[in-house]
Image: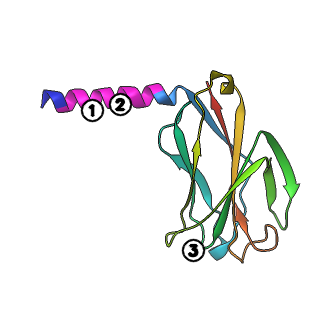
């Protein structure tokens, strides 16, 4: 019992330590697509230098293409209806949503301290055929990730 309790405490401390190593801030607004729903953006996995962050979108249409947009500069580029491209793209990751409307793109982060205090920006475009973004997509809000 003591080992289990110690393991839980150490896990919580490690998790709290990782959380203090980054800052995550949302910006802008997403725009709706299928069923008038705005997809969300988030991540799973450890967040830190030398880790792989799995960026995901959820609450999206099932079984459709999805694009993770990565950049270093915020934007406000109209792309149809109320939709804006909020991240000036540098790189994109193309995937598809699953039957639950979840898409995942793993992003490995180099273990390089020069990446600290830089804002890395992400946004998802979901090509669901019924949204107004680019004539047939929905978009998440933007997210800024900074390693401290």
The magenta region covers: 4-17
The residue at the point 71 percent across, 77 percent down is: 129
The residue at the point 62 percent across, 62 percent down is: 39
Among the 4 quarters of the image, the one containing residue 38: bottom right
As measured in the structure, the alpha-carbon distance from the residue carrying label 1 to the one carrying label 2 is: 6 Å
As measured in the structure, the alpha-carbon distance from the residue carrying label 1 to the one carrying label 3 is: 37 Å
- Circle 3 residue: 63
Magenta segment: does it hold 146? no
Left or right: residue 61 compared with residue 114: left
The disc, 1 or 3, on the residue closer to the chain's N-terminal end is 1
Q: Residues within 10 Å of mark 1 (few under 14, many from 20)?
A: few
At which x and y percent is residue 121? 71, 42
Q: Tell me the number on the disc at residue 12.
A: 2
Residue depth check, mark 3 versus mark 2: number of the one nearer the observer? 3
Residue depth check, mark 1 versus mark 3: number of the one nearer the observer? 3
Left or right: residue 104 compared with residue 73: left
Magenta segment: does it hold 9? yes
Please name whichever residue, 10 or 26, is drawn nearer the observer in this view of the structure: 10
Q: Tell me the number on the disc at residue 8.
A: 1
Under tag 3, what secondary structure? loop
Outermost residue, right side: 78
């Amino acid at each position: 019992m003591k080992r289990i309790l110690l393991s839980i405490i150490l896990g919580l401390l490690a998790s709290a330590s990782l959380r203090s190593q980054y800052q995550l801030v949302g910006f802008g607004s997403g725009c709706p697509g299928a069923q008038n729903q705005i997809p969300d953006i988030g991540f799973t996995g450890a967040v830190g230098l030398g880790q792989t962050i799995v960026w995901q979108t959820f609450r999206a249409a099932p079984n459709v293409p999805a694009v993770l947009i990565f950049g270093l500069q915020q934007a406000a580029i109209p792309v149809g209806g109320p939709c804006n491209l909020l991240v000036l793209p540098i790189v994109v990751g193309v995937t598809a949503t699953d039957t639950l409307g979840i898409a995942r793109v793993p992003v490995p982060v180099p273990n390089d301290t020069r990446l600290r205090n830089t804002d890395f920006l992400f946004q998802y475009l979901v090509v669901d055929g019924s949204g107004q973004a680019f004539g047939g997509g929905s978009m998440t809000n933007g997210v800024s990730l900074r390693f401290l």
